[in-house]
Amino acid sequence: MKTKIIRTILPAISGILTVLGLLVIINIIVHNGDAFTKPDNGFFKYFVPIATIIAIIIQASLTLPFWEKFKQRKRIYGLTLTRFTGVICIISGLIFGFVFWERALGIREFIAVSLTGIIAFSVYWTINLVILRQLDKL
């Protein structure tokens, strides 16, 4: 039971904190150091608790069962773990872009936000799966 709790919480929180750090760096670069003083800093205030809860739920209900299937069978739906994760990151990043896209700023904003989402999800899943692999080795 303790192992399942660790496998559920540690990778999810590590991934969320890494993505938060990445988003802060992107915000600082784009807004010249105003990451926490811009009007949209509510994103950071609400991002951590909401994303952490969602990540833990997804980790427990989807990620761990898929992880076990990938360990038993090297392919699911004809895809390896890397390809499956890549597809998930692209789809999730595009959904992220669509949700946070400010339509008044045009299609370039959608592309920029979607790329940010794809990068964020790629970083999250890379950290998550690397930690799961390390926990399995222990």
Image (spheres, rainbow, N blue to C red):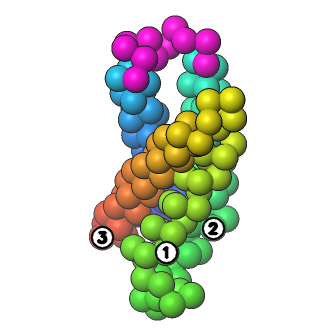
Q: Main secondary structure of the magenta part?
A: loop
Residue 17 or 36: which is nearer the viewer?
A: 36
Percent across and percent down for residue 58 are 64, 58
- Amino acid type assigned to the residue bearing label 3 in the image: Lys
- At mark 3, the secondary structure is helix
Percent across and percent down for residue 102 are 66, 32
- Residue occupying the point 43% across, 55% down: 122
As measured in the structure, the alpha-carbon distance from the residue carrying label 3 to the one carrying label 2 is 21 Å
Q: Which one is in front in this view, the residue at disc 3 or the one at disc 1?
A: 1
Above or below for 89 versus 113: below
> In the figure, residue 25 lies in which quadrant?
top left
Residue corresponding to mark 3: 137
Q: Say whether residue 33 is magenta.
A: yes
- Amino acid type assigned to the residue bearing label 2 in the image: Leu
Task: Say the numbered circle drawn on residue 62.
Answer: 2
Residue corresponding to mark 1: 84
- Residue occupying the point 67% across, 65% down: 61
Residue 63 or 21: which is nearer the viewer?
A: 21
- Amino acid type assigned to the residue bearing label 1 in the image: Phe
Q: Say whether residue 137 is magenta.
A: no
Upstream in sequence: badge 3 or badge 2: 2
As measured in the structure, the alpha-carbon distance from the residue carrying label 3 to the one carrying label 1 is 22 Å
Tag 3 and tag 2, C-beta contact below 8 Å = no
As measured in the structure, the alpha-carbon distance from the residue carrying label 1 to the one carrying label 2 is 13 Å
Q: Quadrant of the C terminus?
A: bottom left
Percent across and percent down for residue 130 are 34, 61
